[in-house]
Amino acid sequence: MKGRLWARIIPALVVLTLLATACGAPAASTPATPVVLRIGMSGSPDSRNPGNAWLTEAFDLMELVYDSLFYIDFAGNYHPELAESWTVSDDGLTWTFTLRDGVEFSDGTPLTAEDVAFTLLAYRDWGEFGYQSGYTAHIADVQATDDRTVVLTVDMPIGNMESQLLFCYILPRHIWEPYAGDVSAAVAFENAEMIGSGPFRLVEFRQGEYYRLAANKQHYLFPPVVDEVIFQTYSNQDALVQALRAGEVDMITEMPNTVFASLQGDPDTAAVHGAQRSLRDYIFNLIAPEDCPPEDGVCSGHPALRDPVVRQAMAHAVDKQQIIDVALLGLGTPGIGLVPQALGGWFASELLAEDYAFDIAEANRMLDEAGYLDTDGDGIRECPADMDCGGRQLDIGMQIPSDIDSGPREAELLAGWWSQIGIRMTPQVLEPDTVTANCCPAFDFDMLLWGWGPDPDPSFILSILTSAEIPTGMSETGYNNPEYDRLFEEQGVELDHARRVEMVHEMQRMMLEDLPYIIPYYDESVQAFRADRFTGWPVPGEGSGDILYLQDPLSLTVVSPVQ
């Protein structure tokens, strides 16, 4: 549920020079001076409300200010967070959690079992409360039997309870209870103060500019070493690099791969790269007019894209390795489906050998045989006579959020290859909010260039292809396959891990065959920090697993100023 890599999706504003000057450099030699860690990013949280947030930047903030019953380390292992211990009944239906003693919310109110029970039931009952509601679908009831004991019952045994509760941020009942029976009011709640129990508390927030966090030095697991963290938004990745070099920020969450080597050679900075749970996707609009969501749907996609032969031919005309080499400078691996390689055994590596090979001749043959011909010799194919394309040739628009720096270059490559098979693709670089509005459930596009940041468990990322998510805005493709839906439901309650892995692999095979997306690559994370100011960053190969995610709470609680 890390959210769309819409990065990602809010137009960024350059932070005022006054702010950077006021922050100053952390002075480790003066104990009375607060230690301030400054992080630069090119996006911004779209909401402070977990039920109205969709972007990775928003969930970075959520994880810093809220706690859950479990947390996950960089190696992908689950550990108890608010839960001190738990037991499971023999039938797998009842989970009994004992909470840690003495935990408080940032407003000083004790966090009790009542808050946990209220939160989980609220997520379930609200139904359409962002990503959170999907994690509570199998909860039958939650009871607080005393201040520290939570008894959770499910309607059937499930094999991934830890992953389902991982992102169920525990909310203070005394703040959220007025919205308990009204999902619209709950989603509309601004949640400006973000009262939570995490290792940091929010003290200042300016949309599109910056937000400031103060350390919770009394946190029961992760009391931060630093005193404050400021996340500053910059207009683009080049501005982030300049801010890092100038000392305005101490770490940047993203940067152009072209500057990686130069930052590595700078004695004051450290540039690192490593695996991340993310992917690029080229999204087809598959929704048919008769299935268009009645309230929000526009459903203007090109009819030819609903033909799997067209999508498969287009996949044959994509050189994934060249995209990686050109757009990522080699820092990525070819993609297959929505489950990235960073998810380990969940990734269906056997499908790599079955991917659509780059073969322009084969793509042309497939389209010829399917009746997509260029009868007027203008280089663009027309739809077969028995397909109503509204007079359109195979001319396709691809919408690209303006904050995806590599998007135009990727689209240029795609347009060149697809022109060789008689398909004209026109890139349309738009403001991220516009792409979001056009996407889902409006389905007002032909294709989109975007990305996802999946959970450690594959259930969430697999869910976006279920037919149930078409009207909710989670499905970007309108893909509708009853067999896929059935497998998704079954894998979610499968207790045998090996069997569940098989089912997840089979769903990836369906994705590859039906091709609602072309997944060109899984990109590596490239981040950098000021090595002359802070130390202790958990980078791959130094005991932190393979995932690189420096803005994670686990990172920000352990870094310390260079003495």
Image (cartoon, grey):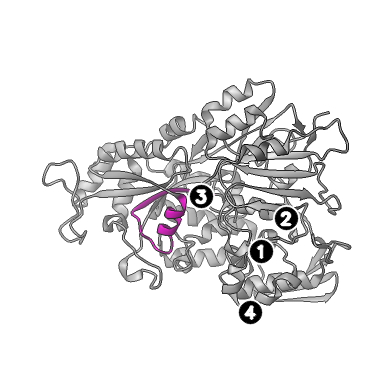
The numbered dot on residue 65 is 2
**Front label number (1 vs 2):** 1
**Seen in the image, is 369 located left or right of residue 58?**
left
Mark 1–mark 2 distance (CA, rounded to whole Å): 12 Å
Please provide percent x and percent y for residue 121.
Answer: 68, 74
Q: Is residue 435 magenta?
A: yes
Quarter of the image with the N terminus is: bottom right
Q: Residue at x 84, y 28 (%)?
A: 563
**Front label number (1 vs 4):** 1
Magenta span of residues:
432-452
Disc 3 crowd, CA 10 A, few/some/many (<14, 14-19, 20+): many
**Seen in the image, is 178 located left or right of residue 499?**
right
Q: Is residue 189 magenta?
A: no
**Do callouts 3 and 4 mark residues in contact (Cβ within 8 Å)?**
no
Looking at the image, tell me whether mark 4 or mark 2 is earlier in sequence order.
2
The numbered dot on residue 9 is 3
Image: 494 above or below 323: below
Q: Amino acid at mark 4?
A: Gly
Please provide percent x and percent y for residue 403.
Answer: 48, 43
Q: Which residue is mark 4?
A: 181
User: Dividing the picture into quarters, in which one does residue 31 lie?
Assistant: top right
**Do callouts 2 and 3 mark residues in contact (Cβ within 8 Å)?**
no
**Do callouts 1 and 2 mark residues in contact (Cβ within 8 Å)?**
no
Residue closer to the observer: 248 or 423: 248
Report whether residue 127 is seen: yes
Q: Residue at x 85, y 72 (%)?
A: 147
